[in-house]
Every structure is written in C-alpha cells, then in structure tokens.
Amino acid sequence: MCKLPFQETADGLDAAFVGVPIDTGTSNRPGARFGPRQIRVESAMIRAYNSWTRAAPYESLKVADIGDVNVNLFDLKDTCKKIREAYREIVATGCIPLTLGGDHTIAYPILQAVAERHGPVGLIHVDAHADTSDMILGEKIGHGTPFRRCVEEGLLDCKRVAQIGLRGSGYSPDNYEWSRAQGFRVVEAVECWHKSLVPLMEEVRAQMRSGPVYLSFDIDSLDPGFAPGTGTPEIAGLTPIQGLEIIRGCRGLNLVGCDLVEVAPAYDTTGIDNKWRKTTTTKSKN
Ligand SMILES: [Mn+2]
C-alpha cells in the first residue's frame, strides 16, 4: 500500500494498512472482496506530501502494509472470528489499524478487538445507510447489521456516535429512529446538501471529546456519480469535497482505527473514483 514496506506483523508500527477481502456479508451486489487489492494498485500514485494540509505522515509515523486477514469466504461467522483475532494482535502492539475493506460486516469484529483494548469507543460513521438493522436476509451478521451488534455488546460510547450521509429508502417510516434512540447523532445526507461540512465537523469534534474514536467510512456515502464502485449505491450523496472536509475535520481526534469499506472495483468501469480512494487512504492515517 502506498509503496510502503510490507511486514508480517504490526510490531513496532504506529499504524498499519490491513486488507479484509470479503463480500460475503453483502445483500445486493458483491465484489468488495476485490477492494483491498484495487486500493493497493491505485495507491501506487499516492505521494508522500499533501500540499494544502501540509500533512507528511511518513515523517512522523512508522507505517507499513501488513497484508490481508486470512478470511474464510465460505463461512462469515468464522471470518468474523478470524478478523477479531487478527485485530486483537494488531491493537495489542499499540498499532492503529487502517483497514481496506471488504464489506461493512468487518466493522463489527474489528470494533470488538478495538473496544477490548480501549473500552467503548466514539464512532464517526460515514455512510449512505445506518447499518443498524437487527437482521439482514434472515441473519444477524451481515453488512447491514454491524453497528446494532456493536451496541448490543457495549462496544460504542453511544453519546459519541455520529452517522453522516444517511439517505435513501428504508424499512420503516423513520429509518433512523433506532440510532437516535441510542443517543447517536444522525446527520442525513439532505442536511449536508449544498453545504460545507466544516461547521458540522467542529460539532462532531466537540461531541467526540478526547476519548478514543473509530472512523468507519463507507464509500457509498459519496454520490455514485463520483464513486460508482460499490455494491449498494444511493443517489444524492456526499461530494468528494465534503468527504475531505469530514476526514480533515477528524484532525486532533484520538483516532484508534479507521476503515474504508464497500469498495467494489468491478462497478467502477472507468476508474472514476480512484482519485477518491487515494485521497481517503492517505488522509485517514493522520
Ligand atoms: Mn455501510
């Protein structure tokens, strides 16, 4: 990733890129198992400095690519167990995992490992969907349920959860009622239209305070006109500029992990969102 060195474990690293190549938790179009390898391919063009933010991550952080989690594509529950165990080892070293997904199911076992080390964490969840269903296609584990499972297991500090970019049709008149009832802040996409998200992120930083925070960024939060390479696209989403405002707005937070999920390269026939992936993956390690 990013032409960084490869190493087998997270030992001695401040942060590590980790791939979790699954799409067996998707309910619509599969393909996110190819996300990590395509993000890595595109990352070859990422340069070491950002001319606007002046970020120079590799001057202050020791970062490497530690490869992919050895998942079981025939058994999603076993995959979750493997992810949890792999992340336990990563976070035990004090390393911050920077995850390349993989469908959104992976956030659940990752957060199990992260919360085991840090206690209940704050969450900035950027997505077209709330991913808080109780069941998906008759199952408890899938890409539409991770944050429901996380709440049930006490992995989240619910007053420090913000969901941004939610939109589209749902299963009930108030699709986001459950989130609000937990104490989450819900910022629907329509509240973001035509606006800079800099003021929103000021409020989100105040909400997160100094506690540990996990950033989970679903590529489908962005409008599919910009980022079509995903399994469950929804119209009228965030712009790339707003995405950057969210990521840059995380500066100063106590980030203990982050992911970019649901990248399904096959639906991006022109490579249009490559630019986006480069920017997200570079910035998320700050
Ligand atoms: Mn999602």
Image: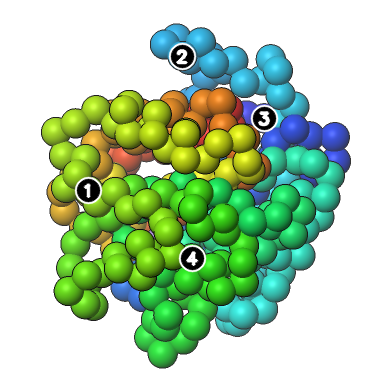
Q: Amino acid at mark 2?
A: Thr
Q: Amino acid at mark 1?
A: Ala
At 36% from the left and 70% from the top, the residue drawn is 178
Q: Which residue is mark 3?
A: 4
Mark 3 in CB contact with mark 4 (< 8 angstroms): no
- Mark 1 to mark 4: distance in Å? 19 Å
Q: Position of residue 213 (x, y in %)?
A: 58, 44
Q: Quadrant of residue 7?
A: top right
Q: Position of residue 267 (x, y in %)?
A: 29, 56
Please give left or right for residue 93 compared with residue 30 in the image. right
Question: Helix, strand, or loop for circle 3?
Answer: loop
Q: Quadrant of residue 111?
A: bottom right
Question: Helix, strand, or loop for circle 2?
Answer: loop
Q: Which residue is mark 4?
A: 147
The mark nearer the N terminus, 2 or 1, is 2
- On the question of residue 103 being in view, the answer is no
Q: Which residue is mark 2?
A: 53
Q: Amino acid at mark 4?
A: Phe
- On the question of residue 206 being in view, the answer is yes
Q: Amino acid at mark 3?
A: Leu
In this rendered view, identify the residue nearer to me: 257 or 2.
257
Q: Which residue is mark 1?
A: 189
Quarter of the figure with the N terminus = top right
Q: Is residue 81 above or below residue 278?
A: below
Callout 3: few (<14), some (14-19), or many (20+) C-alpha neighbours within 10 Å? Answer: some
The mark nearer the N terminus, 3 or 2, is 3
Question: Helix, strand, or loop for circle 1?
Answer: helix
At 42% from the left and 11% from the top, the residue drawn is 52
The mark nearer the N terminus, 1 or 4, is 4
The answer to whether the beta carbon of the residue marked 4 is less than 8 Å from any atom of ligand 1 is no
